[in-house]
Amino acid sequence: MLSNPPIILVVEDDKLIQDLIEKWLSTLGVELHFASNGLEGVRKYEELTRAGRRPDLVVMDIGLPIMDGVEATREIMKIDPEARIYGFTAFYGTHKAEQLLNAGAIDVIPRSVGFEIFTRVIRDALMEEAMMH
């Protein structure tokens, strides 16, 4: 069941990218939470879930400090095998992107598509989630 408003956890270490994601995704009327490294992302996912605010979707970078996006995805999937994780990274088409998919991510969105298309992909993913439940 999709939260109202939908909850998105963004795991991204670059503050400029965080700001751009916030600017674009806020147009979807979502509640955004941010983590700056993989370990913080896993902890935030756990905290939100324990508080009854399980993220409807996670946007995951791959190149993160402390714990990379692949390991963070694995850890989140251990906590919640139903987690919906999308990579958004410059590592699209690389071995790391393949590892992210193998760890449980639904898809990897290349940064090169830009924020307008990224926002559409996230909107469509939320709509798909809403229709599934």
Image (cartoon, helix red, strand yellow):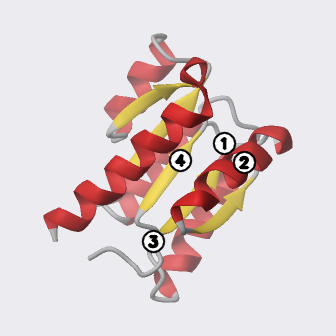
Dot 4 and dot 2 residues touching (CB under 8 Å):
no
Q: Tell me how far mark 3 sits from mark 2, CA to CA.
A: 22 Å
Dot 1 and dot 2 residues touching (CB under 8 Å):
yes
Tell me the tag on residue 67. Answer: 1
Q: Which residue is mark 4?
A: 59
Question: Alpha-carbon neighbours of circle 1 within 10 Å: few (<14), some, or many (≥20)?
Answer: some
Q: Tell me how far mark 3 sits from mark 1, CA to CA.
A: 26 Å
Residue 70 at least partly seen? no
Q: Earlier in the sequence, mark 1 or mark 2?
A: 2
Question: Alpha-carbon neighbours of circle 3 within 10 Å: few (<14), some, or many (≥20)?
Answer: some
Nearer mark to the viewer, of 4 and 2 = 4
Quarter of the image for residue 57 reads: bottom left
Q: Which residue is mark 2?
A: 37
Nearer mark to the viewer, of 3 and 2 = 3
Q: Position of residue 34 (x, y in %)?
A: 70, 60
Dot 4 and dot 1 residues touching (CB under 8 Å):
no
Q: Earlier in the sequence, mark 4 or mark 2?
A: 2
Q: Position of residue 47 (x, y in %)?
A: 58, 78
Q: Which residue is mark 3?
A: 6
Q: In terms of secondary structure, where does tag 4 sit?
A: strand
Question: Alpha-carbon neighbours of circle 2 within 10 Å: few (<14), some, or many (≥20)?
Answer: many
Q: Earlier in the sequence, mark 4 or mark 3?
A: 3
- For the N terminus, which image quadrant? bottom left
